[in-house]
Amino acid sequence: MFSIRGTIIIGIFLLGLSPGLSYGQIWLSKNVTVKLFSETPMEDIEAKTETGVAALNEKTAKILVKIQIKSFVFPRKLMQEHFNENYLESDKFPTADFDGIIQDLPNFNVNGTSQVSLKGTLTIHGVKREVVIPATIIVSNKGVIGKSSFKVKCADYNIEIPKLVVKNIAEEIEIAILAEFKPSKK
């Protein structure tokens, strides 16, 4: 599970202590929700975690998201076991990460909803791929909400589905993400 320490590490990275980043308001989300969904004629598979962390730098539009693979909860223990041991190999590849830039980042001083794209590197199962992910950003007096829904092909991330269960697991997995950001205290 992620701790405050993990969030602080991401926050420090985004604060500009890494080369090439400028100082700007940092927004943190300590309870990122991620849902996985696989639909096949034989069986639907769902999993959820609410322990991801994310940080974004308002000035640079840099965003980082980190999810612990073992934090996903499935309706059946056996599904969870197979997910961690056979497919995602979570002991070997403990996290899924996104490191990118929000294209056309809206003004966080103006309430409203904006459609944006996240362009960057998505790392799953140890495989890094350049992606563009659609997202929605909602700015309100309470903070900033980021939402996204997209599909990931198992083969793109070297996630092998045994022929015996290929009818039970979709080749593309639907991912839905919700992050509620609050400004970090400087």
Image: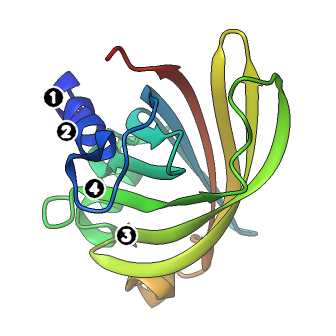
Three-letter code for the amino acid on which mark 2 is drawn? Ile
Is 168 positioned to the left or the right of 154 in the image? right
3D distance between C-alphas at marks 4 and 2: 15 Å
Q: Secondary structure at mark 3?
A: strand
3D distance between C-alphas at marks 2 and 3: 18 Å
Query: In the image shown, does 122 or 15 lie closer to the viewer?
Result: 15
User: Does residue 162 sit above or below 82 in this rendering?
Assistant: below
The residue labelled by disc 4 is: 95
Query: In the image shown, does 55 or 133 lie closer to the viewer?
Result: 55
Q: Residues within 10 Å of mark 3 (few under 14, many from 20)?
A: some
3D distance between C-alphas at marks 4 and 3: 8 Å
- 1 or 2: mark nearer the eye: 2
- 4 or 2: mark nearer the eye: 2
Is 19 positioned to the left or the right of 149 in the image? left
Say which mark, if any, is on residue 9.
2
The residue labelled by disc 1 is: 5
Three-letter code for the amino acid on which mark 3 is drawn? Thr
Q: Earlier in the sequence, mark 3 or mark 1?
A: 1
Is 126 positioned to the left or the right of 107 in the image? left
Is there a contact, CB below 8 Å, between mark 3 and mark 1?
A: no
Q: Secondary structure at mark 2?
A: helix
3D distance between C-alphas at marks 1 and 2: 6 Å
Three-letter code for the amino acid on which mark 4 is drawn? Thr
